[in-house]
Amino acid sequence: MDKLLRGIQPHTIDLCIFDLIPSFANVPYYFYYGNDANDSDFMPAEQLRDGHAKVVVDPDNLNIPEFLESQSSVHFRDLRAAKFSWDALPSGVATVGAITTADAAGIIKLANVHIVRLQDNSGIIVFINMSHYLVDGVGLFGFVNRWAEVCRWKRRGSAANDLPACHYIFERSSLLDKMPEDRKALNDPTLELITTTGPLVRWLAWVSPKTRGMLLSKAFSFMSVVGHTFHFSTSRLASLRASVQGYLPSDVRLSDNDILTALLSMVIAQSQAECKRDSASASYLSSLASYLFPSMYAPDSSFVTQIVIDTRPRLNGQSAPAYAGNAILTHCLVNSMESLTSGITEQALAPIAKSVRQLVNGVDSQIIGQYVDTLHKDLLRFMCPATYAFTKTTMLVSNQSRFPIYQADFGDGIPTWVSSVRALFPNFSSIKPAPPSTGGYVVYISMTEQNMAKLLQNRFWMSTNDMLY
């Protein structure tokens, strides 16, 4: 510890509005590494321990990342046979959940690492989490891949001084200074997302981060949120995209993201609408609840798809991989509930996918500047997006397919599989790359049990992919 303290260069990072919006959330991942070569020196613990970075937020009050190591009686082949289902995981691998909360000592750790060595040295699981206070997904995988690079370097016996430099930018001003002078108006649903305040929003924004984390964690624990993971093969998705494309003009070209986001919008809207109908007619108590909380039970005329946008490539001069802080915003797309719930077909998907393409293409630096200005007018608005789902039928889509998820080679090869934790937030979905040996995309969905049951009954959805677990 003394050596670490002597090496610290005191530095203060002023967080910005991009950090406040997701500050209640964690960014947790499991990385699975198989020792297929039966190497006795497979990913040695000492080098993993020595190579990991130290996160310091206050030189007089060190926030040392949690770093745990443990042994498991579970063999890697059993995890592989279960397709890396969460049910096959050893207990206690994830040391934190989806919400940023304080630990037993009352400290919010900004990073958590748990190395689990599997039976007979058959592989390891690396659980890594960083708080969204500090980074978004780009920053998290930048940290993981740099850690892996350091370990590879040490495994080769190379001198530490010869390690290639890796430059990350944490100064929030480097992002905010890229805002242009001109502005464009936000669309109505996005404006509503970040300006709809009320007593709950203001109170959650006012309380301390520890209290807010505790309250949100308790609230989500009562919602019975479950997750499932689906694989979209390259060939199956290409066939679906070609079919949908046939219903659009030739000058409209759809991406995989457009198709997947449109499909997610339709299937999640349908599952939510069916659950609302069932709840409203189930019993006298449900009827009373629908009267007292109409937004949660009454049929909606519209559905809001919240699309996470990485601002880095849209801000002039901002190198995409260099800025490691939070740089995401949420832009909203509204479709009529009727258009989403009348039945999923390739023809029905076409206008939805086209709208996704237009929305994503339309987010530029002037929109981003207006987004920031709107939030700065009332900083308590940073909690608006977190409470939005309680008043709207909605979902959030985060496309992480360009993240370098399968590049973390600590010296014994890239991970066999990478996944989120079992349950994140209600009505959340993410699109990730599948392992290079498999190709395609892995789609993760987190919903209430009732909504998920409806989704799994949707024949069109289930015909487009393979449910992994």
Image (cartoon, rainbow, N blue to C red):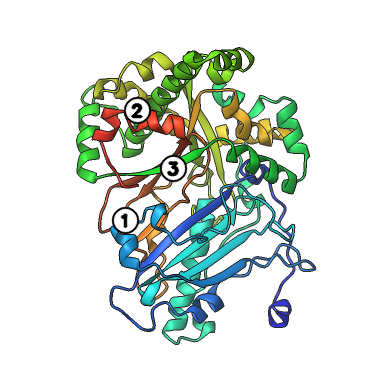
* Left or right for 305, reference 389: left
**354 versus 1 height, above or below:** above
- Location of the N terminus (image quadrant): bottom right
Q: Which mark is residue 244?
A: none
Q: Label 3 belongs to which residue? A: 227
Mark 1 Cα-neighbour bin, 10 Å: few <14, some 14–19, many ≥20: some
Query: What is the three-letter code of the residue carrying label 2?
Result: Ala
Residue in front for this viewpoint, 280 or 458: 280
Q: Tell me the residue at 56%/32% (across/down).
A: 367
Q: Is residue 234 above or below residue 266?
A: below
How many circles with numbers are drawn on the protein?
3
**Residue 155: x %, y % from top left:** 43, 82
**How far is mark 3 from mark 2, CA to CA?**
24 Å
Which residue ends up furthest to the right in the rendered image? Answer: 60
> Which disc number belongs to residue 82?
1
User: What residue would you read off at disc 2?
Assistant: 353
Is residue 174 something one can see in this rendering?
yes
- Whether residue 379 can be seen here: no
Q: Are marks 1 and 2 in contact (CB under 8 Å)?
A: no
